[in-house]
Structure formats: structure tokens, C-alpha cells
Image: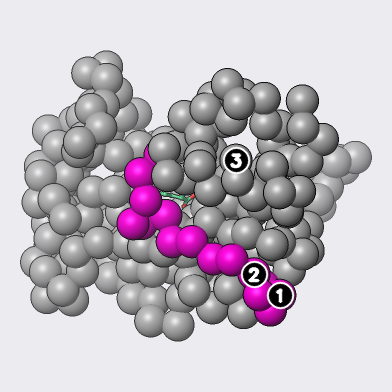
Amino acid sequence: MNMNKVHFVGAGPGDKELITLKGYKLLSNADVVIYAGSLVNPALLDYCKEGCEIHDSAYMNLQEIIEVMEKGIKEGKSVVRLQTGDFSIYGSIREQVEDLAKLNIDYDCTPGVSSFLGASSALGVEYTVPEISQSVVITRMEGRTPVPLKESIESFAAHQTSMVIFLSVQEIEKVVEKLIDGGYDKTTPIAVVYKATWPDEKVVKGTLKDIATKVKEADIRKTALIMVGEFLGKEYNNSKLYDKDFVHEYRG
Ligand code: SAH
């Protein structure tokens, strides 16, 4: 096993200051960086040292990505794979690490702030509002990647818990239809956050009834998250955690 490792680094949702300190250090020491150009803010590349070799994976297939990694490792270089948000959410990290294993190349991972956290910060909301919702469903509509039947939007909608839908804004009408078919009322609050934490972030808020029109008006077709559920609504219950009669050793 080559002692040198490929470093997978979560770039965060957009704002170049939302990379972790560890990720920043790895990026600024890197000799070779492969970044996801369609979604990672190129401003993050300002952190790279002079002469760093930079590849945009938007123009590469898996084999080409692996070849660049292998070459860098063989030459004893520091290789960083910079992925959008956090790689554990729709990050296709698995196929990369499996190919690296075949080549006996080791790797490590530094997490990033996923866009669903960037989006909740943009709105200043909590997904887990006491007595409203205590769970978050992260899902998507099917695209080229199919979604297992038992994970349909309708089936999750039936839980009426907080939901964040990735990779689906281009089909907002269909998403709304499925949410309603699953049991959501048309008055349920819903928000679409485009490029959360980027300088050109856009937020569109509405209900299941009017969100599709608003999203079309705002001309949002990609790089957005759909957030739905009563956690976006007006109803609120204070958490027991800071209740004066509730002494708790885990107060955060
Ligand atoms: N690993 C990434 C998600 C990659 S899938 C993460 O953790 O965020 C790509 C999808 O993520 C996009 O189609 C969009 O739905 C969402 N996305 C990524 N960055 C975003 C951002 N800054 N704002 C809103 N949605 C974003």
C-alpha cells in the first residue's frame, strides 16, 4: 500500500469560508486538486498554492478521475478530491474509493457542510421543531439514477415530517403533485433555496399551491433544494431543553 493518500474534502455549500479548517489546510497544501466544477464555488481554488494542478471533474469520467489520482499518488504528490457540500449526500464517493482500493491507494475523508444545512441557515430555520417534526427526510426525485419504489416522495410525504428534496427543482410541478398525493395539504409551507450561501443565493417561499409558479418566475432550474413541511410554518413550541423547570445536563 502506498503511504500517500487521496484526500476527499467536502467543499461546503458555496460560501468559500464554509469549508472546514482541516479541509482548507489540505486544499492549500495540495499539489493536485480535482474539483466538481459544476457545483463547487471556484473561489475556493484561491486557497490553492501556486503551481497546483487543477482538474474540473465536470469534464472527466470516473476512469479519468482515477487516472489523475493514481498519477499524482505515484509521483508522491498531495492529491485532493474537492466535492460539493458533503460527499456522503449524492457524492458518488463509493465508486471512486472502490476503484482506488483496486489500485491499492489509500484515502481519507474530511467532511463538509452539506447544502441542506446551508439552506436551513439561509432561512434561519430548524428542521426539528418540537411537537411539529423530529425527523428530516433527505431525498430526491428519480432522474438518471432511479429511486427505489418504497422511497417514493408520496410515501415520505405521508409522514408529514421535514423534508429536503435534492436534484429535483427542474420538476417542481411533479414534486408538488407527489407531495399532495402523499397527503400534504395544499396550504403546507414550502421553500426553494437556489445556490444557498453563494453570493447569488435566491430564496422563494410559498405553499404547495403556488410554489411551482413562483419558482418558474424566479427562473430557478438547477442547484436548488426544495424544503417542505410545517417546520417552515408559523406554529412553534419551545424546546424543553431551555425550559426553566427542566434541568438538563446536556444543554447545548
Ligand atoms: N453533496 C452535495 C449534494 C450533491 S447533489 C451536498 O452535500 O450538498 C447536487 C444537488 O445538491 C443539486 O442539484 C442541488 O439540489 C443541491 N445543491 C448543492 N449545492 C447547493 C446549494 N448551494 N444550494 C442549493 N442546493 C444545492
Q: Are marks 1 and 2 in contact (CB under 8 Å)?
A: yes
Q: Nearer the viewer, residue 243 or 60?
A: 60
In three-dimensional space, the C-alpha distance between marks 1 and 2, rounded to whole angstroms, equals: 6 Å
- Residue 54 in magenta stretch: yes
Does 179 sit left or right of 11 as displayed? left
Labels 3 and 1: the sequence-earlier one:
1
* Disc 2, SS: loop
Tell me which amino acid carries mark 3: Glu
In three-dimensional space, the C-alpha distance between marks 2 and 3, rounded to whole angstroms, equals: 16 Å
Tell me the magenta residue range: 47-62
* Disc 3, SS: helix
The numbered disc on residue 49 is 1
Residue at the image point whose x is 58% and y is 73% from the top: 45
Tell me which amino acid carries mark 1: Lys
Tell me which amino acid carries mark 2: Cys
Residue 126: quadrant of the picture: bottom right
Residue at the image point whose x is 40% and y is 39% from the top: 62
Q: Can you tell me which quadrant of the image ligand 1 is in?
A: bottom left
Q: Nearer the viewer, residue 198 or 234?
A: 198
In three-dimensional space, the C-alpha distance between marks 3 and 1, rounded to whole angstroms, equals: 21 Å
Labels 2 and 3: the sequence-earlier one:
2
Residue most extreme to the bottom: 199
Q: Which residue is mark 2?
A: 52
Residue at the image point whose x is 51% and y is 34% from the top: 96
* Disc 1, SS: loop
Residue 14 in picture, x, y percent from top left:
50, 69
